[in-house]
Image: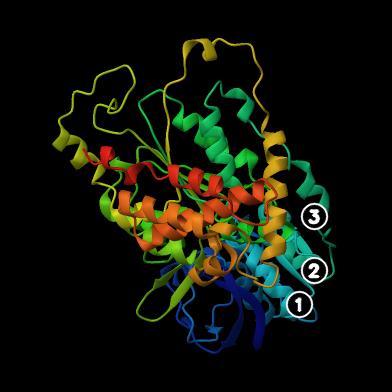
Amino acid sequence: MLTKTYSSAVYGIEATSVAVEVNITAGTRYYIVGLPDNAVKESLQRIESAIVSCGLRMPRQKIVVNLAPADIRKEGSAYDLAIATAILASSNQINVDKLTDYLILGELSLDGKIQAIKGVLPIAIQALKDNFKGIILPNTNAREAAIVSNLKIFGVDNLTEVVDFFNDKHDLMPTAINIEEEFLKKIDQAETDFGDVRGQENIKRALEIAASGGHNVILIGPPGAGKTMLAKRLATILPPLTIEESLETTKIHSVAGQLSAKESLMTTRPFRSPHHTISDVALVGGGATPQPGEISLSHNGVLFLDELPEFKRTVLEVMRQPLESRNITISRAKFSVDYPASFMLIAAMNPCPCGYYNHPEKECICGSNAVQRYLSKISGPLLDRIDLHVEVTPVAFKELVSNETSEKSIVVRQRVIAARKIQNERFKQYSEIHSNAQMSSTQVRERCQIDQQGTQLLKVAMEKLGLSARAYDRILKVARTIADMEQETNIQNHHLAEAIQYRSLDRENWAG
């Protein structure tokens, strides 16, 4: 008897429905076709043990399993439950009436229990598009899938529950999620706050500009000056995620298997801080079975690279293209996948190996050549892609012990939101652009016009600092953001002057 069930495959952050066809005929062999990987090929042992453990009968005949479409590679163990269900239906142990109404997903344990899988959210979104009534999947993944409305989500713990559901012996309770309630529950909860930082008002100003325009930042200063502390608080002043951004971010974390059973929706902007020993593939994504890297897990959030010169140069260089295009394409011989990577980069570094070059009090023990070598670990093209270069100086003792309260993140965030509203209105006709940092060169010419005096100021600065054409665009973008923060229609000279001062690493005294 030929039986068909449906499962799903995930490629990048998109899903494709997969038909699981099972035919049982005379014979003794088990065949699985349709480009299965080893995890799928090994499913027979798990399925047979699970079926027997649940008191059901495993057919001792020729079983042919086809995963269609056959030209797409099938990976992972999520097909176990759909194959087992089709085998039971084909051997007349399950009623087939409702079988094709649902996507069936889950990895089977030997005792029949159902284990969690990855990529449930994009699967649920695709299931709704393909007009399925619902999804049967592991209980652990049920809340994640329930974000998609108008789709019945049935979480199950073992194979017996699935068999009883299709045989009308037991009703399953659908999992329901109030997406608005989930979204608002943690929207203003943060463990860190700008108010925790004493002094450093100029650095806070630079980070507010960065947050207002979505600009990349590098903090340069001696050890203990507060670079990491400030960087970790950047996410707390960014505007809250929109529902669309939240769903897109959740899809990436779902595909990477980084959502917990309790977490159904990413409601806060991600903050990723990989160690400097990270590999190229772990940062940008890839592998034999492509997975999203740190730059994609930071999508719609912040990627923090502490001790930037300690990262391998090859690791830093692979970020150059994603910083411009805001996505990463991972290509293999037979297919390629795209992952979004629209993140804010914030990097921190010491100015030299000992950490005290240009320090106001302590003397640097590094020679000029050592400083030059240390700074040259970060290439010019990468620095060009970082809009703000900010010098961080140590906090004075009187500021450290002061009882004066600093501005809270929620206050700064309101100003950032006001600046972003201006940008949203400016770019409302562009679906891919939401902030000043994302403008193309053409849009910079249109939206960042300056007068004759401003042009002369910028010309002198570029000649003195030896800036590239890309750095010229960066200065104009930052100046546009500063003007937006002051609710100014046109870029003024003082906006340009402030933007120019955020190019510390372009100055001659930083070259050793």
Q: Which residue is drawn at 58% across and 51% down?
A: 492
Mark 3 vs 2, N-terminal side? 2
Q: Can residue 91 be seen in this view?
A: no
Mark 3–mark 1 Cα distance, whole angstroms, equals: 21 Å
Q: In which quarter of the image is residue 480?
A: bottom right
Under circle 3, the secondary element is helix
> Residue 11's x, y, as percent?
52, 72
Q: Which colour scheme is used?
A: rainbow
Say whether marks 2 and 1 touch (CB < 8 Å). yes
Give the residue type at disc 3.
Ile
Instruction: Name the spot of residue 260 as percent of width and height, x first.
Output: 62, 47
Closer-to-camera residue (393/286) = 393
Compute the Cα span from label 3 to label 2: 14 Å
Amino acid beneath label 2: Leu
Position of residue 267 relative to residue 39, above or below, is: above
Q: Which of 246 and 110 is in front in this view?
A: 246
Q: Which of marks 3 and 1 is in front?
A: 3
Pair 3/2: label in front: 3
Q: Looking at the picture, which amino acid does disc 1 mark?
A: Phe
Residue labelled with disc 1: 132
Do residues under tags 3 and 2 come within 8 Å of each other at their CB atoms?
no
Q: Name the residue under label 3.
A: 179
Q: How far apart are marks 2 and 1 (CA)?
A: 8 Å
Q: Residue at x 70, y 70 (%)?
A: 125
Mark 2 or mark 1: whose residue is earlier in sequence:
1
> Which residue is under mark 2?
151
